[in-house]
Image (tube, rainbow, N blue to C red):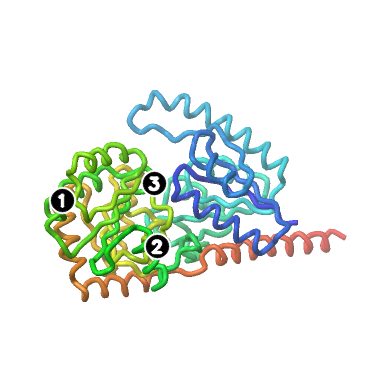
Amino acid sequence: MMKVIISGGGTGGHIFPAISIANAVKERWPDSEILFVGAEDRMEMERVPAAGYKIIGLPVAGFDRQNFLKNFSVAVKLLKSMQKARRIINDFKPDIAVGVGGYASGPILKAASAKGIPTLLQEQNSYAGVTNKMLARKAATICVAYEGMEKFFPEGKIVLTGNPCRQDLVVSAENRTQGYSHFQLDSGKRTMLLLGGSLGARTLNRSIAGAFPKLAAAGDLQVIWQCGKYYYKEMLQLQTEGKMPQNVYLLDFVSRMDYAYSVADLIISRAGAGSISEFSLLGKAVILVPSPNVAEDHQTKNAQALVDKDAAVMVSDAEAPDVLFDKAMTLVRNDRELRSLSNNIAKLAQHDSAKRIVDEIEKIVFLKEVRRLSERGLSH
């Protein structure tokens, strides 16, 4: 029976690919046993069980770059996490350990390597994360979503697989028709989809609120606005006070992303790796506003990788409140530019990423078994 540990998390960008890989492992080996390892106080502790998998939490925390005194407790947590990780490896005895990034994957993959268990890394971003860079030397294979990753990892270990995405997202004429009805939209108007993530993005919300007068005057446009749960009450107040135009449709969370993507002529979004992978697979024209609050400023690097191929438009977080909606309103009316962006981003799509990662897992485990059998043969 195949036994796989999948470790990492901290954000949806790490957790969703991890669950997609687990689902693809189960599809390949229905009797396989999968164990997740995450950080005790992060969102994976809720999301993974909800997806039907067992998870163990480590008391690990990220290093505080602002306040070095706080790092004493971080170091203590890291030591405890290493001890717990060794116990998990000894008890579970995996055939392979998969790391998807985030500091929780460090202890468990180090413990696996020390026991001679092969490891595979999955790097979502165009700028590699600290944990994955640290683990790369011992990894058997590193699955990446962008070209040019040999500047971070040993070239011989890199396999371009793309990022696993939600498989249920389909852009279709039927979903477009259903979407207009679901969101109570006018099918004769151009539609923009503003995505602030599940928690929200302050700059994007400020940008649309500042553009209300322009949007109110734009009779040919409409906006689906996902403001995020943190900002929903505050933004709802604008609606209650009558400040929000009739052609702006406010939601805290979009439950039917297939409908939202299908009706959207233009998307405005942060530049998370998972979101970019979805836009590529679906061939959606997009304006990216990278979050400045992420490690190594990797969202700007993700966005720049698309801009360099004329596959997206980028607006900086600092400029967004002043220029974002002027650019968006001009672009959404330009059929030729929308078509060009859509065609170019679709060329970057990596299909069946989770299955391709499982192909790599299978190769590693098969090779390990071949070696084990040949060593047994030699010893007899």
> Which of the two residues, 30 or 330, is positioned nearer the viewer here?
330
- Is 226 above or below relative to 218? above
Q: Which mark is residue 211?
A: 1
Q: Amino acid at mark 3?
A: Ser
Type of amino acid under label 2: Tyr
Query: What residue is pinned by disc 3?
Result: 198
Residue 352 image point, x, y percent: 52, 68
Q: Would you call the spot at circle 2 few (<14 residues within 10 Å), some (14-19), or many (20 or more)?
A: many
Between marks 2 and 1 in the image, the one whose residue lies nearer the viewer: 2
**Outermost right residue:** 380
Mark 2 or mark 1: whose residue is earlier in sequence: 1
Q: Provide the secondary structure element on which disc 3 rests.
A: loop
Q: Secondary structure at mark 2?
A: helix
| Front residue (pair 16, 214) | 214
Q: Residues within 10 Å of mark 3 (few under 14, many from 20)?
A: some
Query: N-terminal of the two: label 3 or label 2?
Result: 3
Query: To which quarter of the image does residue 191 belong?
Result: bottom left
Q: Secondary structure at mark 1?
A: loop
The residue beneath circle 2 is 259
Left or right: where 282 falls relative to 77: left
Disc 3 or 1, which lies upstream in sequence? Answer: 3
Give the class, few, some or many, for how many residues have Cα within 10 Å of label 1's Cα (few <14, many ≥20). some
Residue 158 in percent (x, y) is at 49, 63
The answer for how far apart the CA atoms under marks 2 and 1 are is 25 Å
| Percent coordinates x, y for residue 209 in the rendering | 19, 46
Image check: 290 left or right of 35?
left
Residue 360 in sight from this viewpoint? yes
Structural distance between the alpha carbons of marks 3 and 2: 17 Å
Residue at figure coordinates x 57%, y 46% from the top left: 50
Q: CA distance from mark 3 to mark 1?
A: 22 Å
Nearest to the observer: residue 144 or residue 266: 266
